[in-house]
Image (cartoon, grey):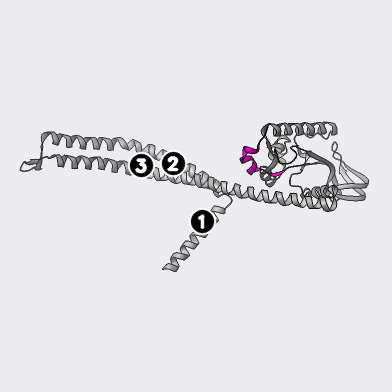
Amino acid sequence: MNKLVGKVAEGATKGLLKVKNAKHTPKVMLIAGVTAIVGGGIWACVQTLKLEDKVDEAKESIDHIKALKDEGEYVVNAETGETAEYTKACYNKDILWSYGQFAKDVIKLYVGPVVVATVGVALVTGSNKILTDRLSQMTLTATALSEAYNKYRQNVIADQGEEADRRYRLGLETKKNFEMQTIDPETGAPIVRKEKSIDLINDIKNVASPYAIIANDCGWWRMDSNWDASQLNAYLNLAQLKYDLQGYLYLYEVYEMLEISKNISPEAIAMSHQVGWVKGHGDDQIRFEPISTHLGSEDVFRDVLLVDFNCYGAINDLVANRAWVKF
């Protein structure tokens, strides 16, 4: 018997863990919880319509008991007309029973709605707890990865210099005497170019920096070097101003300024809500690092402007502890 109970408990625990760790569990719990709360409220309203009848029954019973008290006697046998004294003890017993019966009827009416609404609140609370736990785990992971990434960069710079760090971080590959086909941005026609030495990126996934973006994908990009440079500088100044005012700046805020959020992966968006800049950590300067390069594969490339950012790293814990903010 004990073994059976142990296996059942073990199976239930594993099942709960699978449900808790499922990707959409918080969303399902939230929807179910809100539905239960609303459903419990509607059910309670319906039950309230029946409450009037219960109140009338209780009032009628109490009035009858009070009438017996006033008369001082009650009929024991209706056929013979035999009566007995209606004592104070009888009155107290009957009035208590009447109120107890009314309370019992009210509980029966509302126990269902209360249970459903309570389950709904528990589901919503559980959903919030799961999301909070996941956010905490994500923050710890982002902090660890950020520290490891920064340490790796420091080692590369110390061993091979800043230029090597930049090339590794941006995934740049140098080609000598390279014949490259590009696309004319105005006509769409292919153009063959010969370059003695050129930096290329075969795949955006090769860019080691987790923060870098392709500026060509931004909403304001016009393929006009003067316009694009002035816009990028304007956004840099805006980011610096916002950072100076609030004491911190998340990378996702910069992405939104640059109108790039719709053109990068969900993973990068999630990461951008964890990392950024914090006053007192670093040199308090927001920097955009633009690199003109070429992106493509199979000898077909397009001219792109790769933009990287000098993020400090994961900052959620620092933002939560606002004591360090100095204006």
Q: Rounded to the nearest whole Å, what is the CA distance between mark 3 and mark 2? A: 13 Å
Which residue position is annotated with label 1? Answer: 16
Residue type for callout 3: Tyr
Number of residues whose C-alpha sits closer than 10 Å to that of mark 1, classed few (under 14), some (14–19) or many (20 or more): few
Residue 146 pos. (x, y %): 71, 49
Residue 291 seen by the camera? yes
For badge 2, the amino acid type reads Gly
Dot 1 or dot 3: first in sequence order is 1
State yes or no: discs 3 and 2 in contact (Cβ < 8 Å).
no
Proximity of marks 1 and 2: CB atoms separated by less than 8 Å:
no
Dot 2 crowding, Cα within 10 Å, few <14, some 14–19, many 20+:
some
Task: Of the two numbered discs 1 and 2 on the same chain, state the one appearing first in sequence.
Answer: 1
Residue visible at 50% across and 62% down? 11
User: Does 324 lie within the magenta span?
Assistant: yes
Q: Which residues are magenta?
A: 311-326
Residue 90 on image: x %, y %: 15, 42
Q: Quadrant of residue 78?
A: top left
Mark with earlier residue (3, 2): 2
Query: On residue 39, which mark appears?
Result: 2
Q: Is residue 34 left or right of residue 72?
A: right
Depth check, front residue: 76 or 145? 145
For residue 12: magenta?
Answer: no
Q: Which residue is mark 3?
A: 110
- Tell me which residue sits at (49%, 42%) in the image: 34
- Point 57% across, 46% down: residue: 132
Tell me the element at label 3: helix
Spot occupied by residue 138 in the image (x, y as percentages of width and height): 63, 49
* Number of the front mark, 1 or 3: 1
